[in-house]
Image (tube, rainbow, N blue to C red):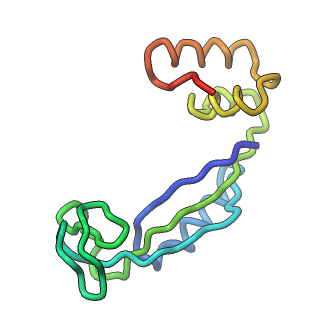
Amino acid sequence: MIRYRFKVVMADSHVGLLQQQLNRRNDHTVLSYQMEQVERGAAGKAAPGGVAGAAGSADVMDETLCNYGVDPVMRVTFDCELLMRTSWCRDLMPEEMLVNLKATAPGILRPQDTARLTQAIEIGLVQGGR
């Protein structure tokens, strides 16, 4: 079982569909999600009801970067789990997840996982710390 978190900015009408697709496919389970309203406005300018901020701030969305249309936009943080049942699934696992496994449960790494992780660290794809 691999736990992961990701954030996405999307039209609020699509949040339920994304959650359904994650739950329906590939053994993902959405444990929880949090939604924050994103104010519209140009970078560094206050949006109506928003606070002035730089591009990418939590308060104001820079519409010069993306066009979301006229739908209300939310910043959604998903906390999920991925069930990795078979060895071929492990081969598809991102190297960052192997780093997490090494840190939390090193005994479950297979020799091929260790070799793949070592190679990823050597070429700089991931940090091997922890």
Q: Which residue is found at the position 45% from the left and 61% from the top?
A: 8
Q: Which residue is found at the position 34% from the left and 72% from the top?
A: 59
2 relative position to 107: left or right? left
Q: Quadrant of residue 61?
A: bottom left
In this view, the residue farthest toward the bottom is 49
Q: Which residue is found at the position 28% from the left and 82% from the top?
A: 70
Relative to the observer, which residue lies in front, 96 or 104? 104
Where does residue 106 sit, x and y in percent of width and height?
77, 24
Where does residue 56 sit, x and y in percent of width and height?
30, 60
In this view, the residue farthest toward the right is 107
Q: Is the N terminus in the top left, top right, bottom left or bottom right quadrant? A: top right
Relative to the observer, which residue lies in front, 59 or 37? 59
Task: Judge whether 105 appears above or below 9 on screen.
Answer: above
Q: How many marks?
A: 0
Where does residue 12 sit, x and y in percent of width and height?
45, 77
Where does residue 113 sit, x and y in percent of width and height?
68, 19
Q: Which residue is found at the position 73% from the left and 12% from the top?
A: 111
Relative to the observer, which residue lies in front, 94 or 100? 100
Task: Judge whether 1 appears above or below 44 on screen.
Answer: above
Task: Judge whether 94 appears above or below 25 on screen.
Answer: above
Q: Is the C terminus in the top left, top right, bottom left or bottom right quadrant? A: top right
In this view, the residue farthest toward the front is 52
Q: Quadrant of residue 107?
A: top right
Task: Judge whether 65 appears above or below 102 on screen.
Answer: below
